[in-house]
Amino acid sequence: MERAREHVSTGEPEGPAQRPEAAGTALELLVHGVGGATPEEMLGDPRTVRITGDETAAVYRRADDADAEGDGLPDADTERRPDDHRTGPVREAYVWCNLTSGNGARALWLLLLPFMVVNLAHWMRPTTRGRTRTVRLYGLLVRLTGLTLTVLLVAAACEVALDLTAWQCAGTRACAQEHSWLGFLSPATSGDSWWSRPGRRLALAGLVPAALTGLLWYLSHRTWSAYESQQPMSRRAEPDEETGRTGLGRPGFWYGRRLVARLRAAHTAAGFLTVAAAVGTSAARYDRAPGGPAVLDTLGRLLDAILVVGAVVVLWVVCRRGRSENRLDQELDQTLVRWLPIGSIVLFALTLVYAGWSRPGWHSAGRLLGDMTFGCITLVQCLLVVVLGVVARILYRTRPDTRTAMRGLAGPAVAMLSCALGGVMSGGVSQRVADWLDGTRDSIPGPPVLLTWQASVIPALLVVLLGLIGWLARLTWTLRRREMNAVELDYKGEPKDTARTRRIASTRAMAALTDRAPRMVGIISFVTLLLGAGALAGAFATEDPPSEAAQGSYAVVQGAAETAQALGSWLIGLGFIVFVTWGRRAYKDPAARRTIGILWDVGTFWPRAAHPFAPPCYAERAVPDLTWRMATWTHSTGGRLVLSGHSQGSVLAAAAAWQLKPSVRKRIALLTYGSPLERLYGRWFPAHFGPAALTSLHREVACWRNLYRRTDPIGGPVRLPGDCGPQVDHEPLGDPLAYGRTERHPLPAPILGHSDYQADPVFAEERAQLLARLKPDVPAPRAQDDDGAGIHRGS
């Protein structure tokens, strides 16, 4: 890609605030959607220039437009004259796709999927009025749910490394002989070597989940430095400024470094404390037995007490503080952030020494305390989700809106799905490792009973999923029949083509299924909660796997239990293999990594408010980028600016517009197309993109038009109430552009769906009308000082 000299906007006026020769310039700032795009594709020109930015995110122009605001004559080899730009806007492309799909290390983000999902639940709270304490309680419950997911992931690693490998397999002759690399840990094959003592085996294996905790800390800290360190524009509030409609306009919304640092310290400490508890519990249980060593018994009780104190401190840190958005919170709790993880590491090291102390009569048998651990985690998660549902319902009833997804219960439902994802990942890893170590010999007890019960309910959940798929298929068929008549009415006078009409109607019907997603998620979450509670009750009541618990009952019940257990084990193992394969492919294949990046485009728009190990929020870089670019360009030129956003780019555009000063926001026109602002974000995140927030955005920008198609499964109308609706939403665009062959379209026109909105002539017409409604500013004198009229650099 050709790169000419780069013009970097710093936000600090360095010359005339507005140049008279540039005041008539019009700019269209394009923001692409999910999946990314190249600047060449966005600008329709193979010769592009990076105006400002870096390799991660940057603004590009056509090479011929690089100095469109300049007053010099063009070079001899330049075909276009400067005044040619007056007939159309200069186009800029903001490319941010590398924020979500970069190098191969991004494949590791798949491990963070449950964390990302629970973080979404934080932002799904319903719109409310005057319920500050209840809103804080909602955020607290989601943060506690996120903490249980960290403990669950580390506990799963402890189950694999400590229980299945070091305790069960290394302690069993038949299993250790099949795996020679475990020979030095096995008393039978190593001749009772130094490392073969149970406590030392556990201490050595404990390094594996500790390394996983360190990896999570590293990923969070690395992305924290790359994303949260980007400061938004610091500015003074104007007298008529109102940020109560949505938090997206608050100065500190896209700068959550303090909360992320606190949560990262707490979750890191929770991970090391979990490993310390897993290593030290078995040794302490042996020391408490009659005849055990008194000194070690005392040390074990002391370590247990310190573990409890550490757990209380972690809970206090998670509960103590939420997000601070009303200002740029640049203070970091240095003592807490530094010493809480260090203290947990020191305690973990002391636990390793304690567990590795010589105990000649200690031999490994059965399982470690995995059933109780996983059972407690599952019980706490179920209770948190239920209480979260009650709180969400209370918030929704204060300001009900029928468009809100699941009547305000979207957050609890998504939190339940995050817990289910964590359970499936934990169970899948444990089951596959147990099968790999032991095969079909049954020489070791295997994973905890609860994990087997949870795997056994997967077939029942699969039956529900198949039922929902059947319902969607029937609904699609019904919608297609209805759309067949609508398509014929839309293309009156065209020669009938049944196959063509059916394709268009099918595309519309499939696109309409997006609006049924809340019901799907609600049913799946509710069934998952019931099945999870049933698995927990069955494991605690019987203490046996389903196949053994059903022995002695009716033959039908016993056969169903055996089938469910075998099929569930196979399904959860298959899911784990697919997950690993997907991650490996994403690591090696940039195309696959870009496909996975689409998932992050949607899921990581929001800041990390509930879980610090979630993938980083790219909007904390993209929104300040767009805000700085718009503010500095309008300040320096006084020209007209159309902010043009497609798909997820329209969400970034709206968020950036909210971050501008009202005086600047009134000089910006907004053009959105294929936009999920209301259809997805307004329904699922009503507190920030609800009707009141979108209505305020319409009133605060100079003008706004929204384009959509009935064939688009993502974009839709903004649906503002009253007279605002027709002012923003254009009537649905025709898709395809031509039903049959015409002089303008001699070949069959494709069904565009969510793509190529700019190919529709309406796009250029609406952009021209927006530009006509904007008026360039009167050139202002040179900026004198920071008296509120200029732009202030973040301190």
Image (tube, helix red, strand yellow):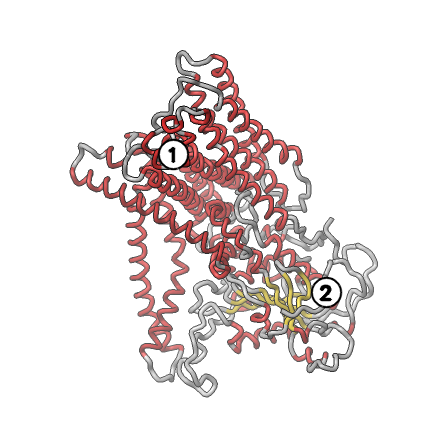
Direction from residue 104 to residue 4 in the image, left or right: right
Q: Residue furthest left?
A: 555
Task: Answer few, some or many: residues within 10 Å of disc 2's Cα (few below 14, many 20 plus, some between 14 and 19).
Answer: few
- Front in this rendered view, residue 258 or 326: 258
**230 w.r.t. 379: above or below:** below
Distance from disc 2 to disc 1, alpha carbons, whole Å, reads 58 Å
User: Could you say where residue 93 lies in the image, as x and y percent from the top left?
Assistant: 61, 67
- Mark 2 or mark 1: name the one nearer the start of the chain: 2
What residue sits 20% from the left and 39% below the top? 557
Toward the viewer: 476 or 626? Answer: 626
The circle on residue 704 is none
- SS label for mark 1: helix
Q: Name the image quarter holding residue 428.
A: top left
Which residue matches tag 2? Answer: 7
In screen coordinates, is 58 left or right of 427?
A: right
Q: Quadrant of residue 221?
A: top right
Q: Which residue is mark 1?
A: 164
User: Residue 609, image x and y in percent?
Assistant: 55, 44
Please state which of residues 235 and 1 is positioned toward the viewer in this rendering: 1
x, y percent for residue 774? 66, 71
Q: Is residue 461 visible?
A: yes
Residue 398 visible (yes or no) = no
Q: Mark 1 and mark 2 in contact (Cβ < 8 Å)?
A: no
Q: Residue at x 41, y 39 (%)?
A: 386
> Please, what is the three-letter code of the amino acid marked with disc 2?
His
Give the SS element for disc 2. loop
Looking at the image, which is closer to me, 238 or 448?
448
